[in-house]
Amino acid sequence: MKAKLWDIVPDFELRYKAGLAYEINHLKREKNAVILGHNYMEPALYHSIPDFTGDSLALSRRAAETDKDIIVFCGVRFMAETAKILNPLKTVLLPAEKAGCSLAESITAEDVRRLRAQFPGVPVVTYVNTYADVKAESDICCTSSNAAAVVESLGTATVIFLPDEYLAGNVARETGKHIIFPTKTPRPGGQDDAQLDYQLIGWHGRCEVHEKFTVEDIENVRAQFPDVVILAHPECSPAVVTAADFSGSTTAMIQYVERSSAPRYLLLTECAMGDNVAAENPGKEMLRLCSVRCPHMNQITLEDTRDALKYTRYVIEVPEEIRVRAARAVERMIAIG
Ligand code: 13P
Ligand code: SF4
């Protein structure tokens, strides 16, 4: 930990966290557990206890493959639920009781059923950042690393894409589709949704972290550092993604930095990831807008991960009837890559 994090985490904090990590790694072996760590985990946790780190898609794959008895998911609830959906015989633990997500909270299973009734026969793609009952109403899931490929794999003229309005906007641009957002009330002029020109039907969910980045942020940073390379997660607005140099999932951004050689980068995503990328790329400067943190990812601490293993808490359960239907949508996504 010290070799990677000496100039990122203060020494006294590193010592304290190294003690916790030692305890967790011991418990992990004793309980035959695997720890999955999302790229947004704070640097000391990220660099010490996970057996695997990655973006939502990579961690879903790891969850599906594991032969351990317990999966501890250092991420948020929808990710731990996805692990349970794919691996129902394992005990899946989330170290924090809630650890939600503004996107997952933006839509219900009933909303999806209503959209299906409004647009009969149109397939439903849902982002993995949703709860199991919403996935269960969907034809296929997607993550930030395969959203456009999933939409195109359906081969249909029209697709319902839920619930992130910005990711939908970015996918619409990438696939050349017109997007609409259905209204509950009639549109001015008396037109109803069915009469409009559309190929992608979106929803007004947003990531409370990525919606904060603006084109003005990009302009300000470029004015100060003309040689900066700017990377934006596709949960940022289409205007921000267009103004950035690259857009991709959390792992795609990590790989972009590793494989390129700019003097400095700006990551428009959760700030802890900037620390993790900086630790892996000592010669490259990471600029980041650190007022922008995910309050849900930040609930996952080393202390709570230790207690999750020690007391077998918080156990993720998904009712079997929902799980089976949700698994179809997630497995269909995994199969297309
Ligand atoms: P990734 O799938 O890119 O890791 O994104 C997950 C997420 O929650 C981003 O906010
Ligand atoms: Fe959800 Fe945004 Fe947090 Fe990711 S960063 S978990 S999308 S609120």
Image (cartoon, helix red, strand yellow):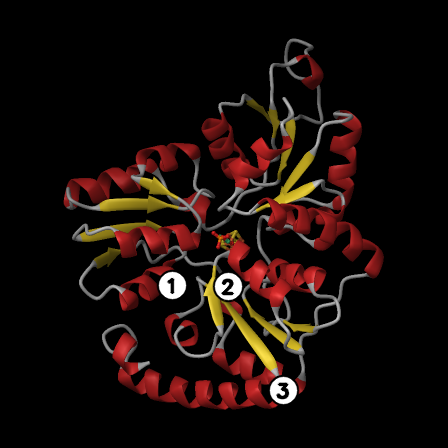
x and y percentages locating residue 182 in the rendered image: 66, 26
Q: Which residue is mark 2?
A: 297
Rendered location of residue 58, percent (x, y): 52, 58
Q: Which residue is mark 3?
A: 31
Q: To which quarter of the image does residue 141 belong?
A: top right
- Mark 2 vs mark 1, CA separation in Å: 10 Å
Is the residue under label 1 in contact with that under label 2 (CB below 8 Å)?
yes
Query: Residue 139: percent from the left, percent from the top?
Result: 71, 40
The secondary structure type at the circle numbered 3 is: loop
Q: Secondary structure at mark 2?
A: helix
- Binning the other alpha carbons within 10 Å of mark 2 as few (below 14), some (14 to 19) or many (20 upward) gives many
- Select label 1 or label 3 by which is in front: 3
Residue 78's disc number? none
Q: Earlier in the sequence, mark 2 or mark 1?
A: 1
The residue where tag 1 is placed is 272
Residue visible at 40% across and 84% down? 17
On screen, 99 above or below 315? above
Query: Marks 3/2: CA distance?
Result: 24 Å
Q: Please say whether residue 127 is visible from this viewpoint.
A: no
* Residue pictured at 27% horizontal, 72% vertical: 8
Mark 2 Cβ inside 8 Å of ligand 2: yes
Comparing labels 3 and 2, the label whose residue is closer to the camera? 3
* Left or right: 142 as drawn, with respect to 170: right
